[in-house]
Image: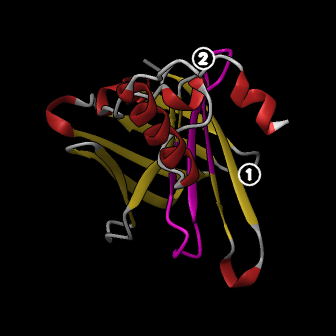
Amino acid sequence: MLDRQCDQDPPKEIPMRRIVGTLALLSGLVLGQLPLSRSEAAEAPPAKLTDLSWLTGHWSGGDGSSRWEAVYSSPSAGTLVGASKEMRGDKTLTTDFEVFRQDEDTITMTPFPFGKRSKDFPLVELDPEAKLAVFENPAHDFPRRFTYRLGPEGQLQIALEGEPNGQKLRIELELERVN
């Protein structure tokens, strides 16, 4: 069969740039340096702190046993600050504040429970259209993950997840905008 192919017309020349391009594409796929689909090829633009502007405002609500108030500043000048308190009856149980900051292409949230600095939690997921932001620090016991979401009715949903003492724990808050 090989002899018969040689008797036929010789193959047309393939331009060198096509050969080089094909080899580059194949080597990129083999080495895992190129995306395999068009959807993977479309990179999302870098996150901006202004993508969290939907947090801005005064929020209030409860988790069934406590009342919560939270206030979030605007994300101007590369920093957004949040302050919250948990109340039961006429007593404040906890106070907390968070600092969200933009450093070049990275957004980090640092909580300050009872005014004491905790670990940094880098942004690991952001969907500006869905108004969802997730911050995570796998090395921390609790919380390990903070999820902020604006619900379908305009409520602020906050979830704290982690494993204190090896036990999974999730705290969910749903807050309504006060102003």
Give, as a three-letter code, the residue at label 1: Ser
Residue at 36 percent of width and 34 percent of height: 47
Q: Residue at x 59, y 25 (%)?
A: 39
Left or right side of 9 for 77: left
Does residue 176 appear left or right of residue 99 in this picture? right
The quadrant of the rendering that contains the C terminus is top left
Label number found at residue 96: none
Residue furthest to the right in view is 1
Q: Nearer the viewer, residue 95 or 143?
A: 143
Q: Position of residue 62 (x, y in %)?
A: 66, 41
Outermost left residue: 77
In front: 59, or 55?
A: 55
Circle 1 Cα neighbour tier, 10 Å, few/some/many (<14 / 14–19 / ≥20): few
Tag 1 residue: 65
**1 or 2: tag closer to the N-terminus:** 1
What is the residue that sits farthest to the bottom in this orientation?
Answer: 165
Residue 87 shown in magenta: no
Look at 78% across and 36% down and name the residue there: 3
Residue stretch in magenta = 134-159
In the depicted view, which residue is nearer to us: 114 or 90? Answer: 114
Q: Amino acid at mark 2?
A: Gly
Please state the horizontal and vertical placement of residue 116, each as a whole percent of the image: 32, 71
Q: CA distance from mark 1 to mark 2?
A: 22 Å
Q: Is residue 90 visible?
A: no
Is the residue marked by circle 2 packed among few (<14), some (14-19), or many (20+) residues within 10 Å?
few
**Residue 27 horizontal side relative to residue 164, left or right:** left
**Would residue 21 be visible to someone looking at this image?**
yes
Q: Are marks 1 and 2 in contact (CB under 8 Å)?
A: no
* Residue 154, x across and y down, in percent: 60, 17
- Placement of 93 over or under 41, stated as above or below: below
How many numbered dots are placed on residues in this image? Answer: 2
**Residue receiving disc 2:** 154
